[in-house]
Amino acid sequence: MSAPFTPFTRRHEGVSYRPFSFLNPTIRKLPFNAKPLETHSSEERLEAEGDDATKPPKKANAELRAEDVQREFRTRDNRKGCRHAIFVVPDIANNPKYLTPPATNSLKEVLKGIWRMFSVYPYWDVSYLVAIIFTLGSVVWCINAFFVWLPLQSPSTEFKGEITDAGGITAFIGATIFEIGSILLMIEAVNENRSDCFGWALEEVLEENGLLRLRPDGCTHHHGNKKNLVGKGKALKG
């Protein structure tokens, strides 16, 4: 059971949470600016879009209307990179202010995430390598458990040198794999992006007056940089 998070508030910084009063905050919730980051008049939009302006406006798939939205900054998400959560208060009083992307806990988004696990292999991402290495180490130690524990449970299955040789060798291999993962974990922590990167911007929804649409913004974390593991981040277009 995790310790309760203690909130505290600072002016212009929203609400921050920390597990204990003597520790630094690990979670922050910050409201979006009331003023949209990108606003264009109807005349400017017509000039910029030309013939496309006469077409029906494109609307993001399954957008949700929200009464309030807050950025949710977590230190672990920041360390892992490109994980930009938002806290959404759904519109229940017919007073929407924002249009937000579909919730990630929907069946479609869950299936999309599972598919990405089996189809995307970001080998250049140190966080991905840490996850893969710790997974491999866990598999080796599960095998080690069979060599060490199974002969005690079923003595008839024991073969010569199973506990002393096979058990010892797999324990050493598993510990070595975890040691490599721990080194990469330290490199990941040292090279975390210490500047605020919240990953979301607002734009005015011209076809629906008064609403602001949340859209992905350029992310400055290094995880999208394919040239090296912990190099300088590169802003990605949403």
Image (cartoon, rainbow, N blue to C red):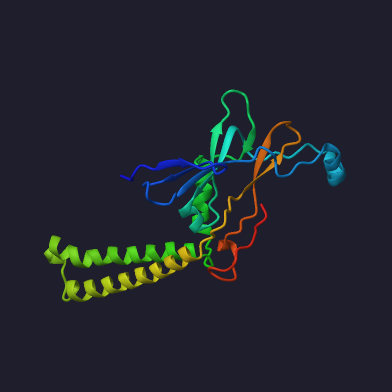
In the rendered view, tell whether residue 90 sits above or below residue 153. above
Q: x, y percentage for residue 189?
A: 46, 63
Q: x, y percentage for residue 194?
A: 53, 59
- Which residue extends farthest top? 93
Residue at x 35%, y 66% (from the top left corner) = 137
Task: Pick the residue in front: 181 or 61.
Answer: 181
Task: Pick the residue in front: 224 or 28.
Answer: 28
Residue 180: which quarter of the image? bottom left
Residue at x 64%, y 36% (from the top left corner) = 99
Task: Pick the residue in front: 172 or 210.
Answer: 210
Query: Visible in this render: residue 17?
Result: yes
Q: x, y percentage for residue 47?
A: 87, 44
Query: Visible in this render: residue 154?
Result: no
Residue at x 16%, y 66% (from the top left corner) = 157
In the rendered view, tell whether residue 13 sits above or below residue 168. above
Task: Pick the residue in front: 225 or 112.
Answer: 225
Question: Left of 18 or right of it: where is 61?
Answer: right
- Which residue extends farthest front? 11
- Quadrant of the image containing the N terminus: top left
In the rendered view, tell whether residue 27 sits above or below residue 94. below
Residue at x 25%, y 67% (from the top left corner) = 144
Residue 165: which quarter of the image? bottom left
